Image: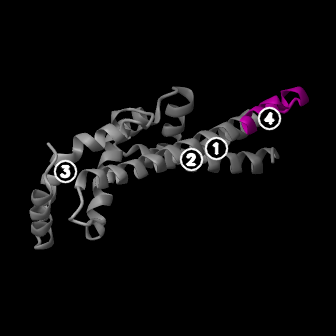
């Protein structure tokens, strides 16, 4: 239910006068359009919800730049497209990092030919013990149970982005620790 220019102007005026709750009217009116744009990202409903929320937060922060002589719909959809592009680029970077990480581990695991597999596994076990119980549990969920970021995030009560960051931090800590302890640099 898109709003006409005058309705948007009136809502913006109320927001500028301190009625922050008036912004909810814009959200309700344009959330369907933003959802359609956000649905282009891979992942589940939670990722789309986060992207929609980020879009409306970003739009709120940029309301002063909005020209009220223009239609609000294309403006908010452009913000959603930008947020979607940023998320897709982030996902591609994460995928690339995971591939590099996988290749590094495969190289290390191929040390089996030189008889170092047991030493690598022992170094990894030792290093996992140095992680906090919480991080070790998340590592186990991701790599032993093969849970998705979304599933892990739901279980630990964090956002998908925060969960990805935790897992990334744990991988870096494990990689560095294994390199130090096992001489697998």
Callout in the foreground (1, 2): 1
Residue 166 visible in image: no
For the residue carrying disc 3, how many other residues have a C-alpha within 10 Å: few (<14), some (14-19), or many (20+)?
Answer: some
Residue 66, above or below 82: below
Q: Nearer the viewer, residue 168 or 52?
A: 52
Marks 3 and 4 sit apart, C-alpha to C-alpha, by: 50 Å
Quarter holding residue 154 = top left
Marks 1 and 2 sit apart, C-alpha to C-alpha, by: 9 Å
Q: Are marks 1 and 3 in contact (CB under 8 Å)?
A: no
Location of mark 3 (residue)? 27
Marks 2 and 4 sit apart, C-alpha to C-alpha, by: 19 Å
Q: Nearer the viewer, residue 65 or 105?
A: 65
Q: Are marks 2 and 3 in contact (CB under 8 Å)?
A: no
Location of mark 2 (residue)? 168
Circle 4 — which element? helix
For the residue carrying disc 2, how many other residues have a C-alpha within 10 Å: few (<14), some (14-19), or many (20+)?
Answer: some
Q: Residue at x 36, y 36 (%)?
A: 39
Circle 3 — which element? helix
Q: Is residue 42 magenta?
A: no
Callout in the foreground (2, 3): 3
Location of mark 1 (residue)? 97
Quarter holding residue 124 = top right
Q: 140 left or right of 58?
A: right
Callout in the foreground (1, 3): 3
Residue range in magenta is 103-119
Residue 107 tag number = 4
Q: How is the image coloured?
A: one colour
- How many marks the image carries: the answer is 4
Residue 7, above or below 31: below
Marks 1 and 3 sit apart, C-alpha to C-alpha, by: 35 Å
Marks 4 and 1 sit apart, C-alpha to C-alpha, by: 15 Å
Circle 1 — which element? helix
């Amino acid at each position: 239910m898109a709003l006409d220019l005058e309705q948007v102007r009136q809502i913006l005026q109320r927001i500028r006068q301190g009625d922050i709750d008036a912004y909810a009217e814009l959200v309700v009116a344009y959330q369907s359009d933003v959802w359609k744009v956000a649905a282009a990202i891979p992942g589940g409903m939670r990722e789309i919800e986060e992207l929609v929320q980020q879009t409306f937060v970003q739009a709120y922060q940029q309301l002063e730049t909005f020209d009220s002589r223009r239609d609000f719909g294309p403006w908010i959809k452009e913000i959603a497209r930008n947020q979607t592009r940023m998320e897709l680029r982030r996902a591609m970077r994460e995928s690339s990092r995971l591939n590099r990480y996988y290749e590094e581990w495969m190289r290390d695991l191929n040390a089996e030919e030189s008889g170092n597999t047991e030493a690598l596994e022992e170094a990894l076990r030792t290093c996992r013990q140095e992680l906090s119980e919480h991080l070790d549990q998340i590592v186990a969920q991701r790599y032993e149970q093969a849970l998705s970021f979304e599933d892990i995030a739901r279980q630990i009560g964090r956002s998908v982005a925060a969960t990805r960051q935790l897992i990334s931090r744990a991988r870096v800590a494990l990689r560095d620790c294994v390199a130090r302890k096992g001489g697998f640099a």
